[in-house]
Amino acid sequence: MDIQKFFELSAGKWFSQRTSHHLAFKQAESGKSDIKIEMLSAQDPEVIKLCEQYEVDPALAWGGARVSWDGTMEWDQEKHAGSSVLVPIPDPEKPNEGQLLRDMGYAEKASVAGRYVMGSDDSFTLITEYETMYSEERIWFASENLRLRASILKRFGGFSMASFCSEIRMGVTKPQEKAADTAAKN
Amino acid sequence: MDIQKFFELSAGKWFSQRTSHHLAFKQAESGKSDIKIEMLSAQDPEVIKLCEQYEVDPALAWGGARVSWDGTMEWDQEKHAGSSVLVPIPDPEKPNEGQLLRDMGYAEKASVAGRYVMGSDDSFTLITEYETMYSEERIWFASENLRLRASILKRFGGFSMASFCSEIRMGVTKPQEKAADTAAKN
């Protein structure tokens, strides 16, 4: 699977259950989120703007995606909502790898590009190195309606967190409960 | 990495945090467990016995492991303790794949053999088909002291659960807290 196909399969609305294992504290924290992933074409002004921000020729991008989320985590009970534009730039020498441009980092709010690799098992791995942090995330499909994500976070050279998300595709026109139920059966 | 190397790296004592996402209920459940993995040689009576039980020539086994666990899950607060002997039998045609013999299944208590594949990314994937269940588990090392496991369970043709474990190696002579703390920094 190439990165474009991976993005296409990811497009849609998802109900995401997230759990973070805080490794040093030996504590787990859960959260839930609605996620929306919309495809963006190469001509989309947001794709072009992001390329320009990273000084990458927009002609190298086939497009990208806007990811929006709206959820809560157990410990703070606050709303976590936001959105981010993602634009993969495949490596000309290695078509299964490349840079992932983002207008907002997941773990820090500064813009930072990650490196992605599409594995031979159709998994997507994203490595992002921030100033004081390192994150590695693996996303894969158990079926077209169940997407899984596992990530680890290093801070100051040590692993601090391991997280896991299970994401069930929500129906667009059906009630959410019903759609999640159907998705879980596929 | 071959399966024997994977077992060798897994040997030791681990503190495991487990989270299960019940997909239809949209609920998460957490648990904690101490896990001990001991290597067994090809001459070990338990390895030979397990091969004989599955009618596999014991000469095909390089050995195996005994996995013991002792933990609790949130919902029932009961002790979950037990142990299982695992013996991988590599496929003569495909050295990275094979059968995994077990004297006890993870998801059901009947004996059942699974199929494993060592991936090119050094991950271990185990697929087990029970009578009314299908489980797929992926285990990989983030570092030599942090082992991650993600699994999905299908019942009656539909995904019912996605689980994730993060396992930190415990020091043998050091106090557990201290060892887990050290491991998390490696």
Image (cartoon, coloured by chain):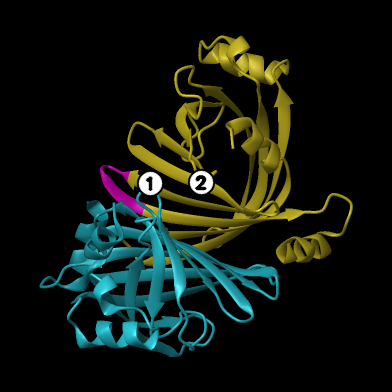
Chain colours: A yellow, B cyan
- For the C terminus of chain A, the quadrant is bottom right
- For the N terminus of chain A, the quadrant is top right
Q: Which residue lies furthest to the left in this view?
A: B173
In percent of width and height, residue B99 lies at: 41, 69
Verify whether residue B1 appears in magenta.
Answer: no
> From what the image shows, is residue A83 above or below residue A75?
above
Q: On residue A161, which mark appears? A: none
The answer to which of B159 and A95 lies nearer the viewer is: A95
Classify mark 2: helix, strand or loop: loop
Q: What residue type is labelled 1?
A: Asp
Q: Can residue A111 be seen in this view?
A: no
Query: How far is disc 1 from disc 2 in space, using C-alphas?
Result: 9 Å
Verify whether residue A157 appears in magenta.
Answer: yes
Asked if labels 2 and 1 touch by Cβ distance under 8 angstroms, the answer is: yes
| Chain identifier of the residue bearing label 2 in the image | A
In percent of width and height, residue A137 lies at: 46, 44
> From what the image shows, is residue B180 above or below residue A52?
below
Residue A94: which quarter of the image?
Answer: top left
Tell me which segment is drawn in magenta: A155-160
Residue B145: which quarter of the image?
Answer: bottom left
| Point 46% across, 81% down: residue | B105
Q: Is residue B62 left or right of residue A146?
A: left
The answer to which of A173 and A118 lies nearer the viewer is: A118
> From what the image shows, is residue A46 above or below residue A30?
above
Q: Do labels 1 and 2 share a chain?
A: no
Q: Is the magenta stretch mostly helix, strand or loop?
A: strand
Residue, disc 1? B121
Residue, disc 2? A121
Q: Crowding near pointer 1: few (<14 within 10 Å), some, many (20+)?
A: few
Q: Which amino acid does label 2 sit on?
A: Asp
In percent of width and height, residue B64 lies at: 26, 74
| Point 72% across, 26% down: residue | A40
